[in-house]
Every structure is written in C-alpha cells, then in structure tokens.
Amino acid sequence: MWCGFERSSYELNEFSMEQQLKTELDLDDIVNIESMFIEFGREDGIKEGIKSGKLEGHILGCEKGYEISQEIGFYDGIAEMWLKIIVDKRWDITKHSINERIVKQLISLRELISLFPKENQQNIEFLELLNKIRSKHKVCISLLGTTKFQKFKRTTIDDKESENV
C-alpha cells in the first residue's frame, strides 16, 4: 500500500523500470563527467606546459647566450691586447717571421669573432663558428707561448651569484 492506495503490479514494475533507467543514466553521466574532467585537465595541462616551457626556454637561452658572449668577449679581448702589444709597441721577437705569423693568426681570430651573430638567426650554425674561434684561439696562444695563462674559465650566472653572497 502506498499512501493509502494500492498499486498494481504493472505500476510497480513501471516505477522500478523508471528508477532503474534513471540510475543507469546517472551512472553514465558520472562516467561522462569523469572523462570530461580528465579532458579539461589534459587541456589545462597542455596550456600550462606550453607557457612554462616558453619561460624555461627563454631563461635557458639567456643563460647560454650570456656564457657564450662572455667566452667570445674573452677571446676578442686577448686578440685585441696582443695585437696592440705586437703592432703598436713594436714587440721585439728575434724571428720576424714568427711575429708576422702571430699577427696574421690574431687578425684571423678577430675576423672570425666579427662573423659571430649577435642576434638569433635560424640558418646560421653558430656552434660550428664557435668551435672555429676556440681552435683559432688555441693556435694564437700556442704561438704566443701563453697556453698555461690565457685559457677561458667558464663561469655561469650561478657562480657569479654565489661570489656576491
């Protein structure tokens, strides 16, 4: 008896089928909601990954650019200093041909350095050029006899910060 009225078996059967159908729909909705939230989370993760990846890439690019520029500047400074000593001060070496060879190598080093890009360019192989500059620097300091003294010591931004503390 339901609220004072008797229900027929047909009505009870229909009522239970409606409830069963409603329960199945609720379960499907729950499963769909779960997959919907998974998809929303995935899309949000992709967006955040792109954003943080760009930021990390920018920071890494700045750090590496700083390190490479520091190295190139070191080589350029050495070449400029030795050219001034040899050419301007008339550095006296007993063998005149060695002096000319050193000057030629130092000028060649400075020319390579001037070719090094100062801006980002897609098509230039700057690592290949950097290796040529390093090799030319080794030749120059070898000819000068300063291989033990004029080597580039790599320092990072983190090293600079720890020195300031």
Image (cartoon, rainbow, N blue to C red):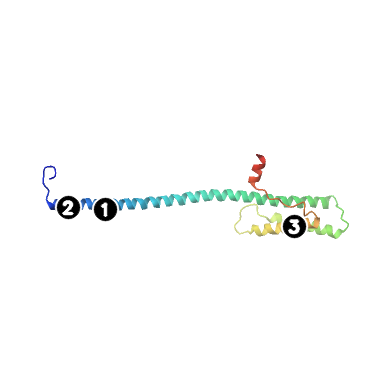
- Quickly name the residue at label 1: 24
Instruction: Kindly report which numbered mark, 3 or 2, lies closer to the viewer in this rendering.
Output: 2
Within 10 Å of disc 3 (Cα), the crowding (few <14, some 14-19, many 20+) is some
- Callout 1: helix, strand or loop? helix
Spatial CA span between label 3 and label 2: 93 Å
Q: The residue under label 3 is which amino acid type?
A: Lys
Q: Nearer the viewer, residue 115 or 69?
A: 69
Mark 1: give few (<14), some (14-19) or many (20+) Cα within 10 Å: few
Compare marks 3 and 1 and give the one earlier in the sequence. 1
Spatial CA span between label 1 and label 2: 15 Å
**Looking at this rendering, what residue extends furthest in the front direction?**
1
Residue name at image x 86 percent, y 58 percent: 96
Kindly check if marks 1 and 2 are in contact, taking CB atoms under 8 A apart as contact. no
In the drawing, what numbered circle is on residue 44?
Answer: none
Counting from the top left corner in percent of width and height, residue 114 is at: 70, 54
Q: Marks 3 and 1, how far apart in space?
A: 78 Å
Q: Position of residue 82 (x, y in %)?
A: 79, 52
Measuring from the top left, give residue 2's x and y in whole percent: 14, 44
Q: Nearer the viewer, mark 3 or mark 1?
A: 1
* Kind of element beneath mark 3: helix
Q: Residue at x 81, y 59 (%)?
A: 101
Of residues 132 and 108, the one drawn nearer to the viewer in this rendering: 132
Question: Badge 3 is on which residue?
Answer: 138
Left or right for 3, reference 110: left
Quarter of the image with the C terminus is top right
Which residue sits furthest right? 94
Which of disc 2 and disc 1 is earlier in sequence? 2
Q: Disc 2 designates what residue?
A: 14
* 165 with respect to 105 (left or right): left
Which kind of residue does numbered mark 2 sit on? Glu
**Residue type at numbered disc 1:** Glu
> What residue lies at 46% left-to-right and 50% top-to-bottom?
47
